[in-house]
Image (cartoon, grey):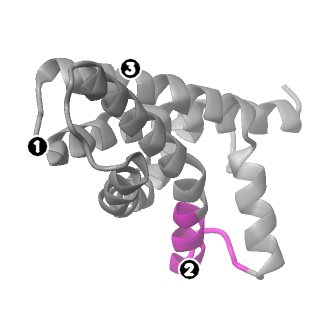
Amino acid sequence: MEDKEIRKSVSRKMGIYMGITLSFFLSLVGTGTSGHFTVRSWIDSFIISTAVSMVIAFIVPVRAIVEKVCEKHGLQEGNLNTRLVESLITDLIFTPLITFLMILFAYVVAKSHGAILMPLVTMYLSGLLSCFPVGFLLIFIFMPLFRKFILDHTDIKEPK
């Protein structure tokens, strides 16, 4: 495999692992903080979130974006500042869209059952306020673990 193909493969696997992880936990946070948690609502939220995450992972070149930003600001791979910036960028890419679609789905379902709700924008901002820090923390913790796991199981060195 060429270097470019390896990088793409590692990036896709990272996107899949991070997408599933973020979907799992953000669905729990979203449905848990809604005040109307049910297993069914969590499963629906998880499925929607996972689908959105997979689309993002396969369309958006997250790793390339992170590398360009880090290079522009002179950040070195592996240090704390770089990990914080990587986590923030990845969180900005994934969490707002996932949160919006999960809230939109819950909003439409609740409205169809006659619920009286606050405006969608208010629900979204409230949900984003709780999901964004959780997403950041999850990305900060799991991204290096998943990267190490993927690289250890592909017999390649860290892509440059």
Q: Nearer the viewer, mark 2 or mark 1?
A: 1
Element on which disc 2 rests: helix
Magenta segment includes 87: yes
Element on which disc 3 rests: helix
Magenta segment includes 139: no
Please state which amino acid type lies under the numbered disc 1. Gly
Q: Which residue is mark 2?
A: 81
Seen in the picture, residue 105 relative to 31 is either above or below; the reply is above
Seen in the picture, residue 146 relative to 75 is either above or below; the reply is above
Dominant secondary structure of the magenta stretch?
helix
Q: Which residue is mark 3?
A: 47
Residue 91 is labelled as none
Element on which disc 1 rests: loop
Q: Does residue 155 show up?
A: no
Q: Which residue is mark 1?
A: 35
Q: Are marks 3 and 2 in contact (CB under 8 Å)?
A: no
Viewer-side residue, 150 vs 15: 15
Q: Determine which quarter of the picture holds residue 156.
A: top right
Q: Nearer the viewer, mark 3 or mark 1?
A: 1
Distance Cα–Cα, label 3 vs label 2: 33 Å
Measured as percent of width and height from the top left, residue 71 is found at 80, 72
Region in magenta: 75-88
